[in-house]
Image (cartoon, rainbow, N blue to C red):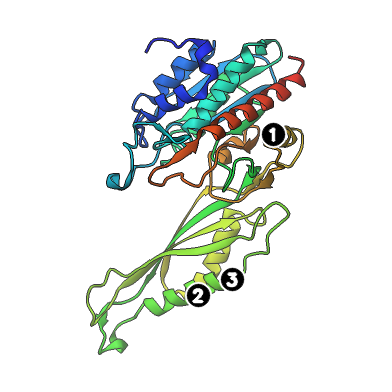
């Protein structure tokens, strides 16, 4: 792909449309990172393509000094769902009635384009390399298992001596209107699979069998009724949700040999995966009889305490929108759960009402607004460093 004219990159819309036109359904890249690398190379960034497994990733940096401000995001998208339900081709990137419509418009190709545009505007008047560095960490594995994306790029960076000071993740943080919310942390996510074993038999002869279903129900009742906590200053209360109960039994006259339940706990900073597993095993030991329990955590709870970096983002949002955004830890997980181990991280992006939905969209005025917010963050960040 031919390098782009750096002067054209100050407008986020062309880059956003080019990115959306790449059908990068996770883990496929479909040329999206080629498009982004072309843009960043035109601005003088050194780009590193980092394939891990079937996932392609990009780490780009301009400058070698500290402080280093990083923007993190992903070019992979979720499947389109029912194609017949879309009013446009999901990868056409159609502009209509002040909206950019397409898969990835909200989550989160438009935000990537906005940060590139903000960087291009900043570089038109400033030499960032005199005071610090700007970096982008873009993965193709955020919507997938998240095993061959950001976490492995961060490991590669550590081996290369690449250090970051602060990171802004461009996920769609605003639930309803642009400027509503900044994410300063996330709850942790803990998954459990519980199999309660029994003895198969005829329902007319229960004394010859051992029905595992009542014991599984007892365990789930205790787990579901437990109030885990009342929340903390930065987090809403933790909650356990049963997501599946299955015995795989099509017969009406057979007591099953086993019963399986799946559940998820979204937890705040009062808990850890180890403490949750310990509690769940205590309940199972008391109620389940013979059982197997498999546990996995996809991220711990974390919070970036309000301070210089979050204040900078708040002021930028206030300047552009006139709103004071809420500092929140609500919602699901993001790759910020990995980045927080390397530097302070916060999240701000577009409105998320249509992410993962049919006719996903981004308002053009919001795309320009988030570009302005990112520019003010960059300006404020490096003005403190003397750029």
Q: Is residue 152 visible?
A: no
**In terms of sequence position, does the residue under pointer 1 or pointer 2 come before the other?**
2
- Can you tell which quarter of the image residue 315 is in? top right
Residue, disc 3: 226
Q: Where is residue 332 in the image (x, y as percent from the top left)?
A: 53, 49
What residue is at 42 percent from the left and 68 percent from the top?
291
Viewer-closest of 244 and 35: 35
**Comes first in the chain, label 2 or label 3:** 2
Q: On residue 214, which mark appears?
A: none
Residue 101 image-quadrant placement: top left
Q: In the displayed structure, would residue 69 be above or below residue 38?
A: below
Label 2, label 3: how far apart the Cα atoms are: 9 Å
For label 2, the SS is: helix
Question: Which residue is under mark 1?
Answer: 313
Quarter holding the N terminus is top left
Callout 1: helix, strand or loop?
Answer: helix
Rounded to the nearest whole Å, what is the CA distance between mark 1 and mark 3? 37 Å
Res. 341 image quadrant: top right
List the residue tagged with mark 2. 221
Residue farthest toward the front in the current orientation of the protein: 97
Q: Nearer the viewer, mark 1 or mark 2?
A: 1
Query: Mark 3 packing: few (<14 Cα in 10 Å), some, or many (20+)?
Result: few
């Amino acid at each position: 792909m031919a390098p782009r004219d750096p002067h054209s990159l100050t407008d986020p819309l062309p880059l956003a449309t080019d990115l959306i036109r790449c059908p990068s359904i996770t883990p496929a890249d479909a040329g999206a990172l080629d498009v982004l690398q072309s843009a960043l190379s035109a601005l003088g960034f050194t780009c590193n393509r980092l394939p891990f497994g079937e996932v392609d990733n990009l780490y780009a940096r301009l400058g070698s000094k500290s402080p280093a401000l990083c923007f993190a995001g992903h070019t992979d998208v979720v499947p389109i769902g029912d194609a017949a339900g879309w009013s446009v081709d999901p990868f056409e990137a159609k502009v209509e009635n002040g909206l950019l419509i397409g898969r990835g418009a909200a989550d989160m190709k438009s935000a990537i384009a906005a940060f590139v545009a903000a960087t291009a505007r900043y570089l038109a008047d400033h030499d960032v390399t005199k005071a610090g560095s700007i970096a982008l960490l873009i993965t193709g594995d955020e919507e997938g298992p998240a095993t061959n994306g950001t976490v492995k790029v961060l490991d590669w960076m550590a081996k290369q001596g690449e250090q970051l000071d602060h990171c802004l993740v461009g996920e769609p943080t605003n639930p309803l209107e642009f400027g509503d919310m900044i994410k300063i942390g996330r709850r942790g996510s803990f998954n459990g699979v519980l199999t309660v074993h029994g003895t198969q038999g005829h329902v007319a002869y229960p004394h010859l069998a051992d029905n595992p279903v009542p014991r599984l129900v007892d365990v789930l009742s205790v787990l579901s009724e437990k109030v885990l906590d009342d929340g903390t200053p930065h987090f809403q209360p933790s909650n356990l949700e049963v997501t599946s109960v299955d015995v795989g039994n099509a017969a009406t006259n057979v007591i099953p040999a086993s019963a399986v339940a799946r559940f998820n706990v979204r937890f705040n900073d009062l808990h850890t995966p180890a403490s949750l597993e310990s509690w769940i095993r205590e309940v199972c030991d008391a109620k389940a009889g013979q059982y197997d329990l498999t546990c996995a955590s996809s991220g711990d709870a974390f919070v970036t305490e309000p301070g210089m970096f979050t204040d900078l983002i708040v002021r930028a949002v206030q300047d552009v929108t006139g709103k004071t955004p809420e500092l929140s830890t609500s919602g699901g997980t993001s790759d910020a759960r990995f980045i927080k181990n390397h530097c302070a991280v916060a999240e701000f992006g577009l409105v998320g009402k249509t992410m993962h939905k049919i006719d996903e969209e981004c308002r053009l005025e919001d795309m320009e607004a988030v570009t302005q917010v990112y520019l003010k963050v960059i300006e404020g960040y490096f003005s403190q460093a003397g750029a």
